[in-house]
Amino acid sequence: MRGRDVTLAAPLLAAEGLGKSFAGIVALENVSLRVDYGERVGLIGPNGAGKTTLFNCIHGMLVPDSGTVSLAGHDISKLPVHLRARRGIGRTFQRIELFPDSTVRDHLVIADRVRHGEKRFWLDVRRHGTPRPDEMQRSDEMLALFGLSELADEPIERLSLGQCRLVEVARALMTKPRLLLLDEPSSGLDRAEAAALASTLFDVQQRQGVAILLVEHDIELVARFTTRCYLLEAGRLLRAGPTAEVMASDEMRAAYLGSLPVPT
Amino acid sequence: MFANIGEDIVTAVLQGAPPGTVYALVALGFVLAYKTSGVFNLAFGAQAYASAVLYFKTHAEWGWPVLPSLAVSVFVLAPLVGFLLESLIFRHLRTAPPVSSLVVAIGLTIAIPSIVDLALDFQPRNGQIPLGIVPNGNSVYYPVFDLYSFSRDELMAMGVATAAMLALAAMFRFTMVGLKMRAVVESPRLTELNGLAADRISISAWMLSSLFAGLAGVLIAPRFPTLAPGRFFDIVVVAIAAAAVGALVSLPRAYIGGLALGVAIALFNTFIPRWANDHSWLRPMQNNITPALPFVVLFLVLVFMPGLRRARFAADPLAGVDPPPRSTVIPAPISASEIVRRTLGTTLLVVTLIVLFTRGDSAFLYLAGQGAALAVVYLSITIITGLAGHISLCQGSFAAVGAFTTYQLAARYDTSVLVGAVAGALVAAAVGALLSVPLIRLSGVWIAIATLAFAFFFDAVMVKFSWTGAPSGVATGDLVVPRPVIGPWDMASDKSFLAFLLAVLAIATVAVMLLSRSTTGRMLRATRGSEIAAQSIGISPTRARVLAFSLAAGLAGLGGALLVIQQESVNYDTNFAPFAALFWLVLVVTFGARAPEGAIAGAATFTLFDKVVLQGTFIGWLLRSPDRVPGLLPVSPKWRLVLFGLGTIQYASHPEGVLEMARARRNRRRAEDDDHDDDHVELALEASV
C-alpha cells in the first residue's frame, strides 16, 4: 500500500539534475523539470538552448550523463525508447516521422495494437490481419476527434504538412499515453494552421486528460496553450513558473533579445 | 630463432605487398566513386571487368601492341562507361536514398559483365591467362634480399597504384576540380545555386572513378587464372574492407588499409601452418580463415567502429524541393474489374499447370520444380526486403544452411529429407537470428554490406568444413540428396515432386501474405518506414529486426533444402554462392519485393525465361511450328542477366516493383479519379528517370 501512496504523490514526470555534454560542449547542465498529471507545460528558449537535448533525454533517444528521469515515481532512466513509450510517454517529431506506404488508419491501428499487445497470432490468421470492430471503433473515434475521418483511407503521402502533424498526434494518443511530448508542432505551419492545430490540441487534451510537454519556438502558441513553462538558455534553467510570469520576466527578455543596457 | 622469425615477418610483408597494393588500388577507386558521387558503387568490379576483358581481347586475342590496347580499354572504354552510368542512371538518383542506388549498383554488377561478354563475344574459359601491361610480366622476377622475388607485373601494379593514390590525393586537396567534386557530393543543388554546373562536375568525377576501375581491372587481371566477373566482384568486397578502415572517405587510409590486408593475409599464411603443427585444432582454420580474413575484418569494422556506423550519408539540404514520394498504396480496385482479373489470372494459372503436367517434357518439369523451390527462397526476400526494408545479400548463405543441414542429416543419420528440410529451416532461422544481433545498430547500406561480408565469410569458411558442406576433396556437386517418400507416395519422379513443391509454395505464399497483413507485418512495415517513430509508439526495434532476419532466413533455408532435394544434389557454387545469389535480389526487386507475386515471377523467370523466351520455344509454339521461329532466336541466356540487371534501375522511383506498379496504375485509371495532381507528380517522377 505504501508503494502506491508514493506513486500517487509523485509527479507524473520528474527529471532531476539532468546533464549532458557532446564532445566537451555542455548541452544541459543540472536541469530539473516536473510535469503533473493532466498539466500543459511549455519548454522555451532560444536556438541552441538545449530544448531538444532535454526532450530527447526524457524520451530516451539520448542517455543523459547525469541525473534521473522518473515517470509516476518509477525511475525510467535506464529504459530504451520503446519501453518508455509503453509506460506512457508518447511523442511527435519536429521533422515529421510517419510510416510511408500506409494509410492514416494504418497508423492508428498499429499504435492501438502495440498498446493492446496481447498475443494475437491466431486472431490475425483468422481475420487475415484486418482490424477488429473494436479497433475500427477506437480509430474512428480518434479520427473524428482530429477531424480526419474523411482521410482515413488516404495514404499519408497525400496529406498536407498540417494534416501530417495531426496524424502524428493521433498516432501518439492511440497508445493512451499519460504524457505527450510535442516537439515544435507548429514548425512548417503558417499562423492560421498553427492556431488551428493549437485549438485541436487543446480540445483533445481537455477530453483525454493527457499531460503535455510542449517544446515550441512560437512564443504566442506557448503563451496561449500552457499554464506553466520552463525557460532554458545555454543548457541551464533560467526561470520556471506560471507561463505569464515567465513571459513577463527579465530573464525572458534577456534570453530572447540579449541584455540591453539599462537607460539611466 | 628470433632472427628466423624476423626474417619470416619481412618475407611475409614483401609477399603481402603485391596483393595488398592490388586491394589498395581497388579500394582507392571505390572510395573515389563513393567520395565523388555518394554512390556505394558495387558495380565497380563490373567496370573493372569490362576494361580487363577489352584489354585481353585486343591484346591477347587480336594481337594489338600493349599501348593501343591499354589506351582503348582504360582511357576510352572506362571513361565512356563512367559517362554512361552517370548521365543515364546515377544523375537521376542523386536525391534517392542510398539503398536505392545500392540496389541499382547491384543490378549493374549483374548486367555489365553480360553486356561486355555479348558485345565482345567473350566467354570466360579456363586456360586463357590474362596478360599484364609489361612484357613477360609474370616470368621475369626481381629478388629482394633473397627473401622474396617480385614479378614485373607486381612491381608495375605497385608503382601505378602508389602514383595514382598520390595524384588523387593531390587533386582533392589542391585543385579546384577536387573542391568542386566534394561540393557536388554534399549537395548538387546547392552547388548549382553557387553557379557551378553540378552535372558536368559529377560526370567528370564518374569518368575519373571509372578510369580507375579500368586501370585496376587491367592491372589486377594477371593475378587471376581466368577472367570471370565473380572474381572482380570478390575483389571489390575485399576493397570495401580495406576502404572501411578509412571510414570509406580517406584515400590514404584506404590505400594503407589495402596494403595492411595484403600483409596480414601473408602473415597468416606464414605462421598459422606452423602453429597448426603443434595445435591440431588450427588445421581446418588454416585453409579457411586466411581467405576469409578481409570479410571478417569488414564485418568487425562495421560492427565495432562507431564512427563508420554513424557516418551519415550525404543528405542534400535541398532534398525537400523534390515532390513528395508517390504513395505506393494501391488504390482500391473496382470490384467488377478485380473479379474479372482474378478469374482470368486463376484460369491462366490452372491452364498452365494442366499443360505443364500433361504435356510438359522432362526438361520443363525439372525447370518448373526448380522454379517452385527457388520461389520459396525468393519469398524470403519478400519478407526481409519487401516487408522489413533491409537489403540482405546473404540469403544464398541462409539457403545453403538449409541445404547442407538436409544433406548432413540424410547422409549421416539417414533422416528423411523432409525432416531434414524442416530442421534446415530451423537451423537457418537460428543463424539468421544470431547474425541480426551484431547488425542491430547498423542501418541501410551498412546492413547490405555486413550481410555481404557474412555471405563471403560463409563461402570461404563454413562451406569447407566436413560437418557443414563438403568433406575435403569432394566437390559440393557430389553431395547426393535423395527424394522423399511419404507413405505410399514416392516422389522420385520430377512430376510428383513438382506437385509437392507447388503445394509447399502455395502454403509458403499464403503464410507470407498473412504475415504481411498481420500485426507482426504491420510492425515490421512501421519500423521500415520510420524506426524512431515505431519506437515512439512502443515497438522494439531489436525484436523487429531479429524477427525479420530469422523469418527470412528460415524461409530461405526451407527453400534451399527443397532446391537440393529437387536437384538431388547440393550444387553450392551454382546455387548459393554470394555472387550467384545477387541475381536473386535483382529479380525479386525488379518484379516487386512487396508482394509474393514478385518472388514467384522472379523464380519463374530465373528458371524458365531462358528456355521459354530466349530459346524461342514460346514463339515457336505461338507460330505452331519450331521452323518458323525467326533466325534471331535462340539468343544467349546472358540477355536474362542484362534485362533484369538493368530492370533494377526503376527501383529508385518504384520500389514496389513492376508488377505492383502496373496494378496500381491500372486501378487508378479504372477508378477515373479526377485527382490530376497525383498524375502530375507521377509524370514528373517518370520524366526525371
Image (cartoon, grey):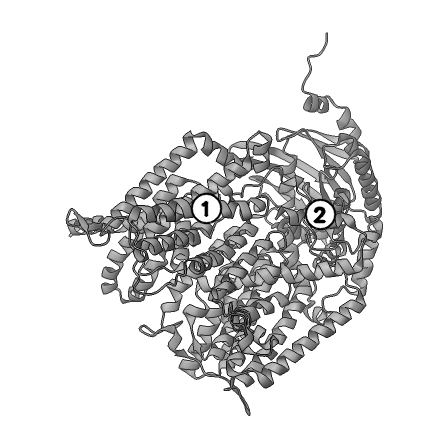
Q: Residue at x 38, y 58 (%)?
A: B231
Disc 2 residue crowd, few under 14, some 14–19, many 20+, Cα 10 Å: some
Q: Residue at x 52, y 81 (%)?
A: B418
Left or right of B132? Residue B77 is right
- The quadrant of the rendering that contains the C terminus of chain A is top right
Q: Residue at x 49, y 48 (%)?
A: B40
Q: Position of residue B300 (x, y in %)?
A: 42, 52
As rendered, which of A27 and B87 lies closer to the eye? B87
* Amino acid at pointer 1: Leu
* Residue topped by disc 1: B80
Q: Position of residue A136 (x, y in %)?
A: 80, 61
Question: Given this view, does label 1 or label 2 mark the residue nearer the observer?
Answer: 1
Which sits earlier in the primary sequence, circle 1 or circle 2? 1
Please say if B289 is above or below B350: above
Q: Residue at x 35, y 52 (%)?
A: B55
The chain letter under disc 1 is B
* Residue topped by disc 2: B681
Whether residue B408 is visible here, answered yes or no, is yes
Left or right of B101? Residue A226 is right
As rendered, which of A239 and B534 lies closer to the eye? B534
Q: Position of residue A190 (x, y in %)?
A: 78, 35
Please say if B306 is above or below B471: above
As rendered, which of B343 and A100 lies closer to the eye? B343
The kind of secondary structure element at disc 2 is helix
The kind of secondary structure element at disc 1 is helix
> Is there one chain holding both mark 1 and mark 2?
yes
* Amino acid at pointer 2: Val
Farthest bottom residue in view: B488
Total numbered circles: 2
- The quadrant of the rendering that contains the N terminus of chain A is bottom right
Q: Position of residue B108 (x, y in %)?
A: 50, 55
Q: Which mark is residue B221?
A: none
